Image (cartoon, grey):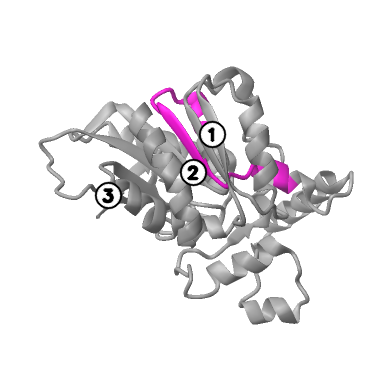
Amino acid sequence: MESVTFKNKTLDVAADLHLPPGFDSARTYPAIVSAHPIGSCKEQTSGNVYGARLAEEGYVVLAFDATHQGASTGEPRWIEDPGLRVEDFRCAVDHLVTLDYVDEDRIGVLGICGGGGYAVSAAMTDRRFKAVGTVTAVNFGRMMREGDLSPDAAINTLDAVAKQRTAEARGAEPRVDVALPDSPEKADELGITALDVIEATKYYRTPRGQQPHGANKSLFSRMGPAIGWDAFHLAEQLLTQPLQIVVGGVPGEFGAYRDGFELFYRARSGQKDILVVPGQSHYDMYWKPEATEQALGALIPFYDKNL
């Protein structure tokens, strides 16, 4: 593995380049851009699980940290802006096509959780992606709009964002939201019962998946663009690449199960498939071998066929 950086306008995007065994720079290889979940980082599931395994199968895999997050630059920190996130993907391809050992006609993309929604959106507007894979993909805009499930959830959140942004423009301290409790024990103490929140806490707040940059933070005043965004917008028209969707068979509150089926039915792709991994939840798909091996069992032959 090599640590690299590439540019998104003036920002430095930090990435890990996972290389195949016996890598030879005189050869050419297919490549995959691998994108992390919301609040995650390249050292977690997108890199150390899916990226590392796909590299073992002969792919050059570029796992990157979103700008304004992780080891990438960008101030203020913890911005979750879909426009910025999707541009990171385009810039990742810009970097790959400068590498002599990457075949520019054999580049795919993989996104996990929110990274899956961004991967879909990026592929619709960057035809250099020849195959699209998602694991427990979430349409982050949809999730943000639902909020507390009331009819006015999105409007109420946007009103609060507006007030906070005005306050910060006038010198107030930024509001940085932390999505998860500090520990599983704290989640129990708070009486949290939502499956996805409990399992996210067990992943991000324990040695199971904990990494310094996997902070699950967001700058509240910059959440407006996400609330007005739809990862699957124009999928019926623009998403034509081969598509492999993987979801866990145990639905959770974040909605990846239903998002997976919505994407499957909406995508224009002539070749598309959805794998439901029985008995596995959203966060099982990040790390649990019984889950990730089934996901990779679909993804590897999918990329082999289409790249």
- How packed is label 3: few (under 14 Cα within 10 Å), some, or many (20 or more)? some
Q: How many marks?
A: 3
Query: Residue type at mark 3?
Result: Glu
Real-space Cα separation, disc 2 to disc 3, in angstroms: 18 Å
Secondary structure at badge 2 equals: strand
**Height in image: 48 above or below 306?**
below
Highlighted range, magenta? 120-144
* Among the two numbered marks 1 and 2 on one chain, the one whose residue lies closer to the N terminus: 2
Determine contact: label 2, label 3, CB under 8 Å: no
Reading the image, the residue beneath label 1 is: 120
- How packed is label 2: few (under 14 Cα within 10 Å), some, or many (20 or more)? many
Asked where in the image residue 96 lies, by quadrant, the reply is top left
Let me know if residue 72 appears in the view.
no
Determine contact: label 3, label 1, CB under 8 Å: no
Query: Residue type at mark 1?
Result: Val
Quarter of the image that includes the C terminus: top left
Asked where in the image residue 155 lies, by quadrant, the reply is top right
The x, y position of residue 216, in whole percent, is 57, 62
Q: Nearer the viewer, mark 3 or mark 1?
A: 3
- How packed is label 1: few (under 14 Cα within 10 Å), some, or many (20 or more)? many
Determine contact: label 1, label 2, CB under 8 Å: yes
The x, y position of residue 129, in whole percent, is 41, 28
Q: Name the residue furthest front.
A: 278
Specify the label residue 111 is tagged with: 2
Tell me which residue sits at (76%, 69%) in the image: 193
Tell me which residue sits at (40%, 60%) in the image: 43
Q: Is residue 102 left or right of residue 257?
A: left
Residue 307 located within the stretch drawn in magenta: no
**Height in image: 119 above or below 41?**
above
Reading the image, the residue beneath label 3 is: 56
Q: Is residue 82 left or right of residue 104?
A: right
